[in-house]
Amino acid sequence: MAAPPGYLLLLFSLACLVPSSCSRTLVLPLARDPSTLRYVTTVYRGPSLDPVPLAVDLGGPSLWLDCSASGPSSSPAVRRVPCRSIQCLAATSDASGLRRACPGGASSVCGVRSGGGEAGVLAEGAVAVDSVDGSGERSVAAVDRFLISCARAAAAGFAATGVRGTLGLGRSRISLPSQVATAFAFRRRFFACLSATEGIIVAGDGPFFSHLSADVSKSLTYTPLVTPNSPRASDYVINLTSIKIDGERLPLNSSSPLHSVKLSTEIPYTAVASPIYSAFAEAFAGAASAMGMARVPPVAPFRVCFDPRTIGTTAAGPDVPAIDLVLQSEMVKWRIGGWNSMVRVSDEATCLGVVDGGDRPGSSVVLGGHQLEDVLLELDFGGSRLGFGPPLSTMQLSCSDFRSGFNSMASSSL
Ligand SMILES: *[C@@H]1O[C@H](CO)[C@@H](O)[C@H](O)[C@H]1NC(C)=O
Ligand SMILES: *[C@@H]1O[C@H](CO)[C@@H](O)[C@H](O)[C@H]1NC(C)=O
């Protein structure tokens, strides 16, 4: 039975007299795809809310979607926006977003290009995300005129997975967190908890942590976000001043200066730039040997591997030398240890899960998925700062515990 719209409006405003039910939290449940090791989430598109699986790109500027692929039901195509439009200007006006490419002149469609090399056509259409209100009531929150970058190549590399594109969560005006913050007047920030099994991203009013046994928000350390030295200005990048292994500063000279750390969900393992990697691997192997860990032949893509039987264990995983990324001061460190450091490759080899990143310019260290898992992150793009917690395991928690407070509609379908 359809209720008249006025009736619904009344119900909604009455419900809002109870403040908790007015608050809204958007929820993106994450699952790690085993073949690509990418974190996949689901948004909904069109009036029939067709689920669209997307690979999360933490620093990506936009939602890149293969708009030509048809969904489970035939939803109407998104509407392309012209080059001469407010939307085209908005999407390409800030330095951290996309660049406009309108070869057909101002009356053509709005072509867009990212610093990362993706190219497509700007379109708008309804995009919805799971949401939960303060009383636990689930629904979807829709942005009717969400700006999407349509690109046939958006799903390339995800062939067998059903993934239809990538969901950019970066520091641009048309990333998903930015568009939903504008649409719902949220604070411009979100929390991410990546996991091999049950990760989650949440944005909105909260409460975010009331269901957890420890107030994890109090354990966050903050560091300023800086303008990337990389092609993608939408990336989340922080300054790096030194690296310590078991408290010992890596001996680096001026020919291999350290400058920044980028956070990435595009790579499964942290990559350290070549000139620094050799010193890094050597220092780690030396400290490990002092702890009685026995080297075994490397297993690609890793270079530094050990006999698992010679590695002790702690509540936070393997007992291995601590890696500290020293940020804006000696007091501010991002510590990598335990499960975040090591990858069990076989019964014969457990390897340091950090790879040689090659000579590409950009960040000295790109923190990849394995090192970001089960660490609570606050991506505060409005406040230009990043909050990061200690591994949740040190508080006897995991991302699954965090996610359990936001049982959303998509949780069961992922
Ligand atoms: C980051 O490092 C650069 C280069 O050393 C410096 O100019 C900049 O002020 C630093 N930014 C912050 C926020 O500390
Ligand atoms: C600086 O470090 C590089 C690589 O670690 C090394 O090849 C070079 O000899 C070092 N230079 C000096 C002056 O120590």
Image (cartoon, rainbow, N blue to C red):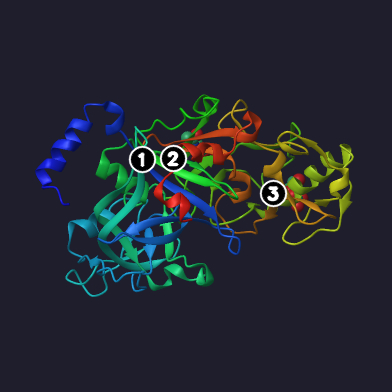
Give how far apart the Cα atoms at labels 2 and 1 are.
Answer: 7 Å
- Say above or below: 390 vs 298: above
Q: Residues within 10 Å of mark 3 (few under 14, many from 20)?
A: many
- Say above or below: 408 vs 324: below
Give the structural element (helix, strand or loop) at label 3: helix
Say whether marks 2 and 1 touch (CB < 8 Å).
yes
For badge 1, the amino acid type reads: Val
Say which quarter of the image contains residue 349. Answer: bottom right
* Depth check, front residue: 35 or 118: 35
Query: What residue is shown with label 2?
Result: 406
Say which quarter of the image contains residue 398. Answer: top right
Q: Position of residue 246 (x, y in %)?
A: 76, 34
- Residue 58 at least partly seen: no
Q: Residue furthest front?
A: 1
Q: What label does residue 132 carry, if any?
A: 1
Give how far apart the Cα atoms at labels 1 and 3 are.
Answer: 45 Å
- Residue at 31% x, 50% y: name it: 94
Residue 190 in the figure: left or right of residue 245: left
Q: What label does residue 368 carry, if any?
A: none
- Residue at 55% x, 41% y: name it: 400
Give how far apart the Cα atoms at labels 2 and 3 are.
Answer: 41 Å
For badge 3, the amino acid type reads: Ile
Q: Position of residue 2 (x, y in %)?
A: 15, 51
Q: Earlier in the sequence, mark 1 or mark 3?
A: 1
Residue 315 in the figure: left or right of residue 12: right
* Depth check, front residue: 189 or 365: 189
Query: What residue is shown with label 3?
Result: 276
Front label number (2 vs 3)? 2
Front label number (1 vs 3)? 1
- Residue at 59% x, 58% y: name it: 37
